[in-house]
Each structure stands twice: as C-alpha cells, then as structure tokens.
Amino acid sequence: MRRLPIRSLAVLTAIGALALTGCGTETGTGTSTGAGAGAGARGDEAASAGTGRTLTAQKVMQVTKVHEETGMTLLEGPVFAPDGSLLVVDVTAPEGKPKVIRVDVRKKTSRAVHTDGRGAYTSAQFSPYDGRIYLTDFHGEVVSLAPDGTDPRTFFSGEVDGAPMNPDDIAFDQDGNLYLSDSRGLSEGEAHGRVVRIDRDGGKATVLADGLAATNGISFDADYRGLWFSELTENRISYLRLDEDGKVVSRHTAIRVDGGIAQTDSIAVDADGNLYQGLHGRPAMIVYSKHGERLATVEIPGRAEGLESATNVAITPGGTRAYMTVSGPAGGYLYAFDALAEGVRQSNGG
C-alpha cells in the first residue's frame, strides 16, 4: 500500500487529519533476458542469487494528479470488474474527489465510482460470494459497494482481540471468507501487525498470525492451500499454510527481498503460482517463483522522473496482460506488461 515519502507516517497522519476536519497508441512490452535465477532449494538465498529477466512496462495512461488538499496521490488495488473495466482506488483522495475510479484501458478513459468523507481505501476486490466490491479503509473498517459503486455498507468495523485494525490488503478464499493484512503498529514502528480472517457474513474475526512488521501484501497461492503475505518494514515474504477449515497449520519466512531503499508492498499470484511483489520507494515489481527463485524484474522505461512506487498489479483474468499502479509526485499512472502466466482471482485485486 505505502511508499516513501508519499505513504510515510506523516502521510497517514495527514489523511487522518483530513478525515477529522471533513475535509493514444496501443501499449507494447519490451523484454530482455538477463542472468538466470538461483535455485529455489536454497530458500532465502535463491531470491538474492539471480536477477532473472527484465520486463519493461509501458505507460497506458495517467489516472490521477496530485491533490492540492493532501499534496499527494497514490493509486492502489487494481481489480478487473466482470464487465472488463478496471477499478483502482486513490488512497489519498480528499472528500469530494474520486476514491474509487473505473478505467477503460482500451479507450484510456476514467470516471468516478465512489467518494465519501472519511475512507482512506487501500485495496479493492470483488467477493466470490456476493459479487460486491470490498474495500479496506486504513482507518479501521472494511466496506462494500454494489458493482456499480452504489449502496455503501460497513462489512466490518471495530476491534479484533481487543485491538483496533489498520486494514491494508484483501484476499478471499473460494467460499467468500475474507483474509486481510492488518498494518497495526506501523505508526509506532512496532511489530504489532496481523493476518486476520473475517467470516463472509462479517460476524466473526480471527487472528491467524501476529507480531508482524507492518503487514502489507496478502494473496492465496494458486491452489488455495496457503497465504503469502509481506511485511513492509522487514522486506520479507512469509507463507501461512492453512487447513480446509482456514486454520493455521504452519508459518515460515519464504523470501527475503533485497530491495535497497525500496520495501515490500502488495502481492499478486498468477496461474502458475508466481508471486508479483510490488515495491514502494522504487517504481518496479519483482517476480518470484513459489520456490523463491527470482524470475524477473518489472521496470518502467528510463528513470520516469516523479514516479516512485509500483504498489500493485492486476493480471487480466484468463489472459497475461498485466496493469500496474505506479505513483509519485508526477501523479498516478497505469503501466502495462505481459505477465509470466495467466491472471486468476489471486492476481486480480487485493
């Protein structure tokens, strides 16, 4: 979700203050082949051993500009709707400006879907249970909308195990139960983050993992056997094995990301089980195999002045065209590239 400096703690404070005061050509993909990745059997070392290919993402369109009221813009949560349009959220949009935006990537047009006076929406995903759009509000709620953006409802709000949440990203299981990354502790710089499961009716919330360092990306693997999740301030990706009832069987650190000044943001998983790890602090993504091999790096052309993060990606369901949200002082953009495998639910939103 976040990137520095736009998604620094100062930004989150600014968003909270705003809430309290009421306030064309066809895109192409260039690909070059680099050194091979290290062997997956070496675990963490594999991610560091090789660099894989470089996939060059091409600009599709600018979606947002920096808002005067907040001094920033940040696109997140790309998700394809059943009609083929792409929804994105602007985390830092003030009241009255579009917070959920529908994009036609072919026509390169966009229009507002939803706004309100409080939400700082960090992700979006359609539920397989009721077909509604679910949004995480970093202030502590999960809300849902009808597919056309109307009928806002609070799905979940309040404390979990005696502590408030800072919901970030979403993953749904096949039955429509919701799993989210809780970035609790981020503002204090403490490892109070969690992975939380919320039943599909919103009635029960269960902590599956805690003691995490700013939990951010979350996605099921290709077989729905477990959850991948990233920790922003530790630059690591962990794996949470689940049983058929959604209970934790095991947990381990899977990949340590060598990001330099960049840190681990959102995660998407394609049909082959490959992980697309977004970065804040660098407009790029890193692609890993499920065994920890570094397969590719997705870069934007040149230095692209004013773009500083590539937070998330949606891969076209049943296709390989991928759309990456890229933001910075220059605004919020969509960039496109060809993914390594087809898009599935785990690579569409969250």
Image (tube, grey):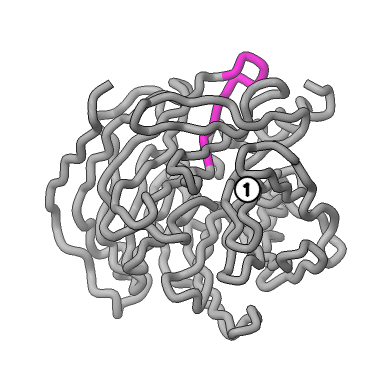
Q: Residue furthest front?
A: 83
Residue under label 1, please give it: 133
| Residue situated in front as seen by the camera: 202 or 310 | 202
Residue 135, percent from left and from top: 65, 46
Query: At 67% across and 48% down in the image, what residue appears?
Result: 136
**Total number of numbered labels?**
1
Please say if 253 is above or below 145. below
- Residue 195 visible: no
Classed neighbour count for the residue bearing mark 1: other residues with Cα under 10 Å, few (<14), some (14–19), many (≥20): many
Dominant secondary structure (helix, strand or loop) of the stretch shown in magenta: loop
Q: Quadrant of the N terminus?
A: top right
Residue 185, percent from left and from top: 71, 53
Please say if 184 is above or below 70. below
Query: At 33% across and 62% down in the image, what residue appears?
Result: 288
| Residue situated in front as seen by the camera: 97 or 127 | 127
Query: At 29% across and 28% down in the image, what residue appears?
Result: 303
Residue 330, percent from left and from top: 44, 21
Please say if 101 is above or below 204. above
Query: At 81% across and 63% down in the image, what residue appears?
Result: 160
Residue 167, percent from left and from top: 68, 52
For the record, the magenta segment spans 67-76
Left or right of 330? Residue 197 is right
Element on which disc 1 rests = strand
Left or right of 91? Residue 290 is left
- Residue 277 visible: yes
| Residue situated in front as seen by the camera: 349 or 219 | 349
Question: Residue 200 falls in which quadrant of the image?
Answer: bottom right
Mark 1 residue type: Ile
Instruction: Let me know if residue 274 is in the magenta part.
Output: no
Question: Residue 270 falls in which quadrant of the image?
Answer: bottom left
